[in-house]
Amino acid sequence: MEMFPAADPIPLPAPVWLFKLLHEVTLTLHFLAVELLIGGLLVGLAWRWLARSRSDDALAQGSGMLAHRLPTVMAYVVNLGIPPLLFTQVLYGRALYTSSVLIGAYWISVIFLLIGSYYGLYLAAARVERKQPWGLTGLASLLLALAVGFIYTNNMTLMIRPEAWSGMYEATQAGNQLNAGDPTVLPRWFFFLAATLPTAGAGLLLLGLKTDLAPAVGRLLRFWGGALAAGGAAAVGVMAFVVLGALPEGVREGLADNAVYAGFGYVWWAAVALLIAVGARQAGKASAALPLAAGGAALAAFVQTLALVMVRDGIRDTTLLRAGFDVWDRQVYTNWSVVGLFLLLFVIAVGLVVWMARVAFSARKVEEKYV
Ligand code: HEM
């Protein structure tokens, strides 16, 4: 029996490679924002509790600086998540729609979990402005965001398990089951959790370059930033082995045999090594800002995330191909005028984002004081 629903008879309006390219670029940006969000929440909350137990003003100020920025980061998480979702639906709709229906109740709940998490971030930021504690609000926001990530991991792993679909549908059509029994779910979710740390570390190092910081706050940002970049990269390196070990037989070999995925695998390890090196360097010399270390960590975090997106894509395509779904095997009828218009609007949108960032950076500095 054919495991996948029939393909849409309408051909794709652009080549598969273009959809893939746009998907990888926008998903990399989405993942970077997710990493900054979850990592920023983890660090901000840890600092908040340490500040209370140690009565430490630098920790309280640092935690306030993070809470103040998180609603903006969430805006990027959401807005940068929508484009890859559209591209994934175009390329893998037959698999993704099926898994989304099977976990329908959870999938729909993402909207409400997300609204709750976003609201919590705004509340936390408002409380920080008023110098009130924000730990519980932040914790609730973190738990809701983690639940969203967990549901995403369930859907993205179930969409590549067509052999499980009919059994699940026979068991219940209520959409209230997750991708249970798949040994890749938990390793993958913990991998994403670990991956938030080095990127958050790189973010702290960039923040530590600000020239108007009190010396103790600067040291805090640089020490923690360096330690998280190095320690988080080591943790994510360990988790990579766990994820690879949990893959079904043949998928690991398929990845190794593909020059593109294997190449990005090496790039990923190089970025992890760079994060460990520059992170350790800055953590060991937290009294001074090292712009090269901060820049190196930011670049390595970007490359690590891009390479991870590519290898993750390889896992999906290799697994699906073994089940008879070839993503490249599609009818394409390129509508170049639409593609051209899309690319033009894309460039204009990127230009607008750059312009907004310049306006934000050149705005008159407002003193940040949360203690
Ligand atoms: C708190 C908010 C969010 C968190 C923590 C989060 C986290 C994640 C995680 C962990 C994954 C990887 C799952 C895996 O492969 O195992 C993922 C994938 C993805 N997320 Fe998000 N996400 C959030 C919000 C959103 C939103 C609002 C959208 C879109 C509207 C979105 C779009 C996507 C897409 C398109 C993918 C991957 C699709 C693909 O496989 O091609 N995310 N997200």
Image (tube, helix red, strand yellow):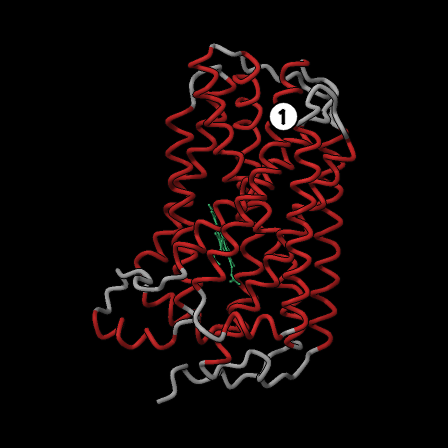
- Picture quadrant of residue 219: top right
- Residue at image coords 53%, 67%: 88
Q: Quadrant of residue 335?
A: bottom right
At mark 1, the secondary structure is helix
Relative horizontal placement of residue 320, taking residue 286 as reference (left or right): left
Q: Is residue 55 above or below residue 118?
A: above
Label 1: how many Cα within 10 Å (few below 14, some 14–19, many 20+): many
Image label count: 1
Q: Position of residue 277 (x, y in %)?
A: 69, 39
Percent position of residue 179, x then y: 33, 63
Residue 361 vertical placement versus 162 (above, below): above
> Mark 1 is on which residue type?
Phe
Of 79 and 289, which appears nearest the observer?
Answer: 289
Q: Position of residue 283 (x, y in %)?
A: 65, 28
**Residue 211 point in image, percent of width and height:** 75, 20
Task: Identify which residue, 201 or 4, lies in the foreground.
Answer: 201
Q: Check disc 1 and report the residue beneath it.
A: 223
Q: In the displayed orientation, state which residue is furthest to the left.
A: 171
* Ligand 1 under 8 Å from disc 1 Cβ: no
Check the image and report above or below for 53 versus 106. above
The structure residue drawn at horizontal position 51% and vertical position 80%, both measured from the top left corner, is 321
Up/down of 173 relative to 153, above or below = below
Horizontal relation, residue 282 to residue 180: left or right: right
Which residue appears farthest toward the bottom when viewing the image?
1
Query: Which image quarter is the N terminus in?
Result: bottom left
| Residue closer to the observer: 294 or 28 | 294
**Picture residue at 49% right of the left edge, 50% below the top:** 192
